[in-house]
Image: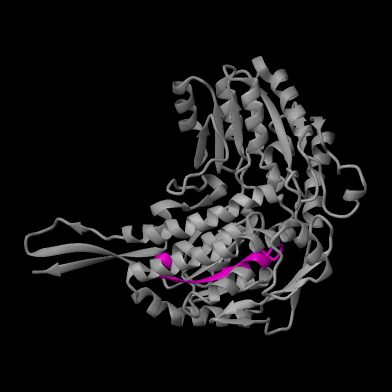
Amino acid sequence: MTETSFPTSPEAAAAAFRKSPVTLRMLIGGELVESSGGGWIDCLNPATEDLIGKAPRATQADVDQAVRVAESAQVKWAELPVQERSNYLMKLADAFTAHADELLMLEVADSGNAITAMKPDLANCVERLRYYAGLGFELQGHTIPGASDRMHMTLREPYGVVGRIIAFNHPIAMAVHGMATPLMAGNAVVLKPSEQCPLSALRLGEIARDILPPGVLNVVSGDGAAGNALVRHPRVKRLSFIGSVRTGMAIQRSAAEVGVKSISLELGGKNPFIVFPDVSVEKVSAAAVAGMNFGLQGQSCGSTSRLFVHDAIYDEVVKAVAEKVKAVRVGDPFLWSTQMGALNTRAHLDRVMQYVESGASEGARLVAGGAAPAGAAFEKGYWLQPTVFADVAPEMRIAREEIFGPVLSILRWSNLEEAIAMANSVEYGLTAAIWTNDITQALRTAKRVQSGFVWVNGVNSHVRAVPFGGYKNSGIGRERGIEELYSYTEEKSVQIFL
């Protein structure tokens, strides 16, 4: 299988990647290149442990080259009229549509995520490119009233080179998002995908190479050393990272050692789902399962992994949730009937299993899952059944720490003050869900919960124009909408004496 011949059906993909792993290269300055150090990253299918591809292991010199060509290309890119930059993004959206099937197959093979979960990501990528292609026209300054002998105005100008480091759970969606907004704002981009899932981003670089001016977008694959080189590069003044709290904090420290940089972070979540007693048990239990993002094996920072249920309906909800979770179909990610695939790596599976063992040893009641599925199909790969613990106490590890896996903790409450205190007791504050038929109660609770994004009687719903981001250690800055577009510009004030 060559770099220009990709399978576009699940059946063909499963066979093709096993037979002939794909070798992809980095995009630097409009050229497809290997690592200057000769190193490679082996990409394994999480469901089978088969080698499906190889990605270059970028060196510090590679990252430096990517930044320098980006800096050079950015000047002319920023000088283009907004309409021309918009046209480029629209052309990229059209090309993405033409290659959507092959990108989907590559994504499923590299991530282990169920194809049913990944399919919407591909559609969202196209929508996102077209959305920001239009939103760029709203990148406006202001005139400000002042003295009669002078005029005051503000300008929005790009930073220059933007470094974006993305996570493994939505690889292609994050890659597209990672470039669309800063490009529309007039920046050039150096994109580093996760070493766990780099293939779709590298393929995106191949596609973009034929559309964007050389150097405007650069894609470098590598491990933490490459990421650190990007963070510490003195010519990168704007950084964005999606990943763990620990890595986000390390990025802040590392970046501050070499300069003052603008940094946005979307980090972890231990998100509460607060259930009042006036709701439908059937609806809320279905929402609790949906909120766990089992199609991504629970590997989502927005998953509502702490379910707080009022005492009056607690037993009913626990039973209904357990039944629904046990019905989730775990299996081959390429099958359309599969609802949950394999965790991303062996190391990550081992980490999640430590939490499962911790929950049992600390006294939580296991009501679903807790082990790998039975059968020959699961002898290889990184498998875990969707797992639910009931009677969880707020001091337990599974209630305090982000697991980033298919593990749901159910806690009981009878006093709202107690529920809000428990919900706010962790270091995270990304999302929250509130379910009640009392709108006043819902709004009061939404104001008191310490989360950057709150759903009322819903989960996992995002609108492109609505800002998304976290409180506390869940991050800084906001993605999506005009707020994100502005964040990739610096504001300059101009005072003109008349």
Residue 214 is one of the magenta-drawn residues: no
Q: Nearer the viewer, residue 200 or 292?
A: 200
Residue appearing at x 64%, y 82% in the figure: 33
Quarter assignment of residue 226: bottom right
At which x and y percent is residue 315? Answer: 72, 19
Residue appearing at x 60%, y 32% in the figure: 273
Pick the quarter of the image with the C terminus.
Answer: bottom left
Residue 289 in the image: above or below residue 376: above
Which residues lie in the magenta part?
A: 183-201
Residue appearing at x 68%, y 67% in the figure: 199
At which x and y percent is residue 403? Answer: 71, 45
- The answer to whether 307 appears left or right of 144 in the picture is right
Callout count: 0
Residue appearing at x 71%, y 19% in the figure: 316
- The answer to whether 57 appears left or right of 158 in the picture is right
- The answer to whether 79 appears left or right of 327 in the picture is left
Pick the quarter of the image with the N terminus.
Answer: bottom right
Q: Nearer the viewer, residue 200 or 91?
A: 91
Quarter assignment of residue 408: top right
Residue 12 in the image: above or below residue 203: above
Residue found at the very far top of the displayed protein? 312
